[in-house]
Every structure is written in C-alpha cells, then in structure tokens.
Image (spheres, rainbow, N blue to C red):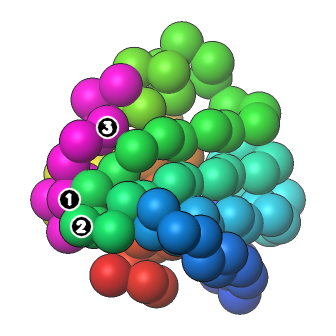
Amino acid sequence: MPSKEFLCVNKFISDNGFMLEAEIPKTMGICAKNITIEVDKEGKIVDLAVIGGCAGNLEAVARLIKGLSVNDAREKLKGIPCGKKDTSCPDTIAKILRIYA
C-alpha cells in the first residue's frame, strides 16, 4: 500500500478566478504526474488538465466536471479507488479541490 505523501498544491489567482496546480509524488500511488484545475470567480470548474494517467478516462472526467461547482465535483470524485489501490486520479483531484474549497 502506498504511503500517504503530503500533496503540495499551488494556487494562482487571476482576474477570472484561480488555478490550482499539483505535482503528484510517485508515492501517492497514482499514474498522474501533474494536475491543473482552473476555477472561475463563481467557484465553477472551467478546465482540468492531467499529465500522465489514463488519457481517455481523465478526458471523460474533465468533461463531466466542467461547469460543476468545486464542492459538487469534490463530492462526486472523492473516495474513488483504482483497482486494488485505495486512491485514484479522480480521488486526488477531489483532494486538491478540498484544499481550496
């Protein structure tokens, strides 16, 4: 079982809202290497970009959470496992959203 690594998230503020960016340590146990989430001033997700991971699945996640509030997206994604792992790329996205929700 992978250890729980500290997840460092950077927040960049813009005129349109903010962007969250996280470098994902290998010890978190997921395939994604970098996750960036753009959020508008109303707290709605504008864009999700993931480097690494399952491209098709993560494109689907990005399309499905676009337009959702940060809280709604977090609730839908938290706790999703990947195979026998107790975490996943969607679960990590939820953890990133929790930091700034």
* Residue nearest the viewer, comparing 44 with 28: 44
Left/right placement of residue 34 relative to residue 92 reads right
Vertical side of 30 occupied by 5: above or below: below
Q: In front: mark 3 or mark 2?
A: 2
Label 1: which secondary element: loop
Q: Amino acid at mark 2?
A: Glu
Label 2: which secondary element: loop
Marks 3 and 2 in Cβ contact (< 8 Å): no
Left/right placement of residue 94 relative to residue 55 reads left
Q: Which residue is mark 2?
A: 42
> Where does residue 69 sit, x and y in percent of width and height?
20, 59
* Residue nearest the viewer, comparing 23 with 26: 23
Q: Is residue 33 magenta?
A: no
Q: Amino acid at mark 3?
A: Lys
Q: Which residue is mark 1?
A: 69
Vertical side of 71 occupied by 98: above or below: below
> Where does residue 92 sit, x and y in percent of width and height?
51, 60
Q: Which residue is mark 3?
A: 66
Magenta stretch, residue numbers: 63-74
Could one spot residue 28 in this view of the protein? no
* Residue 3 picture quarter: bottom right
The alpha-carbon separation of the residues under discs 3 and 1 comes to: 9 Å
Vertical side of 101 occupied by 53: above or below: above
